[in-house]
Image: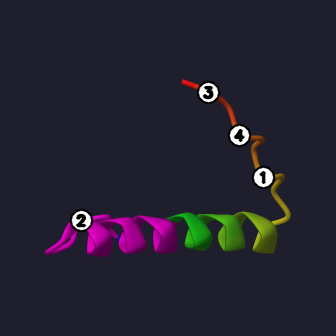
């Protein structure tokens, strides 16, 4: 399972971005709609 940890802040951010890209690609491959951004 991918993670968002890293030895530096920049590495953790890059890892997090990679995870987001993986989820988006998986949703598209499965024909799922990608959720719209929302505020917390």
Residue at 68% x, 65% y: name it.
Answer: 24
Q: Position of residue 19 (x, y in %)?
A: 48, 68
Q: Nearer the viewer, mark 1 or mark 2?
A: 2
Q: How far is disc 4 from disc 2 in space, using C-alphas?
A: 24 Å
- Near mark 3 (Cα within 10 A), the count class, few <14, some 14-19 or many ≥20, is few
Mark 2 element type: helix
Instruction: Name the residue beneath numbered marker 3.
Output: 39
Q: Are marks 1 and 3 in contact (CB under 8 Å)?
A: no
- Near mark 1 (Cα within 10 A), the count class, few <14, some 14-19 or many ≥20, is few
Q: Are marks 3 and 2 in contact (CB under 8 Å)?
A: no
Q: How far is disc 4 from disc 1 in space, using C-alphas?
A: 9 Å
Report the magenta residues as a range.
3-19
Mark 1 element type: loop
- Near mark 4 (Cα within 10 A), the count class, few <14, some 14-19 or many ≥20, is few
Q: How far is disc 1 from disc 3 in space, using C-alphas?
A: 16 Å
Q: Nearer the viewer, mark 4 or mark 1?
A: 4
Residue at 30% x, 71% y: name it.
Answer: 10
The disc label shown at residue 34, or none: 1
Q: How far is disc 3 from disc 4 in space, using C-alphas?
A: 7 Å
- Is-magenta flag for residue 4? yes
The disc label shown at residue 37, or none: 4
Instruction: Name the residue beneath numbered marker 2.
Output: 9
Q: Earlier in the sequence, mark 1 or mark 3?
A: 1
Image quarter hosting the N terminus: bottom left
Q: Is residue 39 left or right of residue 5?
A: right
Q: How far is disc 1 from disc 2 in space, using C-alphas?
A: 27 Å
């Amino acid at each position: 399972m991918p993670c968002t940890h890293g030895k530096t802040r920049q590495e953790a951010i890059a890892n997090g971005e990679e995870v987001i890209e993986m989820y988006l690609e998986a949703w598209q491959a499965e024909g799922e709609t990608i959720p719209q951004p929302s505020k917390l």
